[in-house]
Amino acid sequence: MPDSSHLPPPSSLADLPFAHVLPHTAAISAAGRLSIGGCDVRDLAERFGTPLYVFDEADFRATCREFRQAFESRWPKVTVAYAAKAFLCRRLARIIADEGLGMDVVSGGELAAARAGGMPAANLYFHGNNKLPAELREALAGPGIGRVMVDNFYELETLEAIAAEAGVRQPILLRVSPNVDPHTHAKTTTGVLDSKFGFAIATGDAERAVKLGMEAKHLDLRGLHVHLGSPIFEVEPYEEANAVMCGFAAQMGDTHGFEFKEYSPGGGFALAYNREQHAPPIAAYAERFVSTLRKGLEDHRLPEPALHIEPGRALVGRSMVAVYTVGARKEIPGLRTFVSVDGGMADNIRPAIYGSKYEAIAVDRPLAAPEETITLAGKYCESGDILIKDAVVPRFQPGELVGLPASGAYNLAMSSNYNMATRPPVVAVRDGQARLMVRRETIDDLMARDVL
Ligand SMILES: *Cc1c(COP(=O)(O)O)cnc(C)c1O
């Protein structure tokens, strides 16, 4: 039995040890069940089926505003750009545009969805370590996008040629690798020397890139970008990166006349997934970030560059709850009990690849006391298809609904058709209204690409 068994039973959602990972509008419905955005989650599951991703639009919009407020109140010129790779559909792009944020894209597909959702081209920023020539052409066509974050020498050369061909002068930032370790998962660490991303300062590549970028006739080198990795629960790595980047910018100014007009410290802001994790408030990140940046700039007598902040996970993660239906149970006496649900690694591969730990909430009886420790397993043919190892939960019955909070970022974005799974729908809820944002994939969809 869990240690918490001696505690009084929770009387509201706020008493749950993982209340802080639930979306802002989570509440108890008139029927005593979990509700999100004023919608009873069981009603949603009956209407749309499970697995189901419920998107709390008010939560998402509030987080967009919190990010903008935190940085815009502390720095004269800031763009907050949502990193679309965390999750993207056209309606989300529309909401982002509506909230006045920009958007980072990393592929032609994301670029197309962002444009189709109504994102103004000027607010789009293109990242990636191997952008294809066709993708770069697409980015510069029509109204060209705001910035291309150039990652390597091949891209510098290709982009210069494509910009010349298009007859434009494309604004760019250079992605620099400052060799700062953010102390996160090795698979999501990007700003160290041994990384496929960016021009390393340590090898002299970053300096050569600055020189080439300044010389390129059809490129307008506006500044520097770093992205350390994700999720970063500490503020110190950003502070360290600021010091390195200010030093580098100053040196490039002295030796090459480089002007540090824009600076992007990337994303990676933490998101709490479970009761043990607590992310610093966004305002706290912003405060420490801005003060160390000011100091770095003053130390090197540099003017204040425009800032470009790129949260993905911390913007959308908490806004979605994944909802599954409980099925089979397998007990191995003295060892482990598996409770399986109707989704798993095809819609959420994060526990399998990053060892991420989620919480489970009993949708039909959210305040039920925990009764046992189980492993919540997916339905796919892989022993590693586990959603939560050692979850302390009520005794789930077949047919019961279980919700996994903090499922908005990199779940559906990394989803697959493994076992020919059909990918789940996303339903946006707001003020008691539910609206399909992405429909469930069908068997016909699966067959559509299969040429007989
Ligand atoms: C992935 C990525 C982000 C967003 O990271 P999060 O952890 O989702 O905040 C921002 N910038 C760049 C360059 C990225 O690759």
Image (spheres, rainbow, N blue to C red):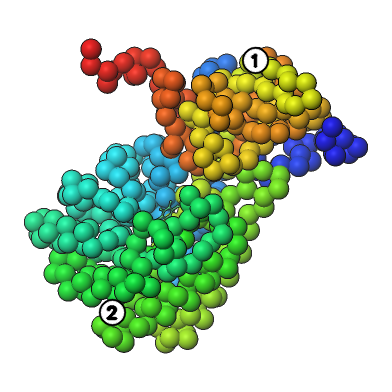
Q: 312 or 338, which is in the foreground?
A: 338
Rendering coords of residue 51 (x, y %): 54, 23
Residue at the spot 63% in from the left edge and 40% down from the top edge = 357
Label 1 neighbour load within 10 Å: few <14, some 14-19, many 20+: some
Q: Label 1 sits on what residue type?
A: Ala
Q: Is residue 249 left or right of residue 256?
A: right
Rendering coords of residue 25 (x, y %): 63, 39
> As displayed, is residue 32 above or below residue 152?
above
Disc 2: which residue: 258
Q: Residue furthest top?
A: 452
Residue 51 visible? The answer is no
Q: Secondary structure at mark 2?
A: loop
Q: Which mark is residue 328?
A: 1
Q: Which mark is residue 130?
A: none
Q: 248 or 8, which is in the foreground?
A: 248
Q: Label 2 sits on what residue type?
A: Phe
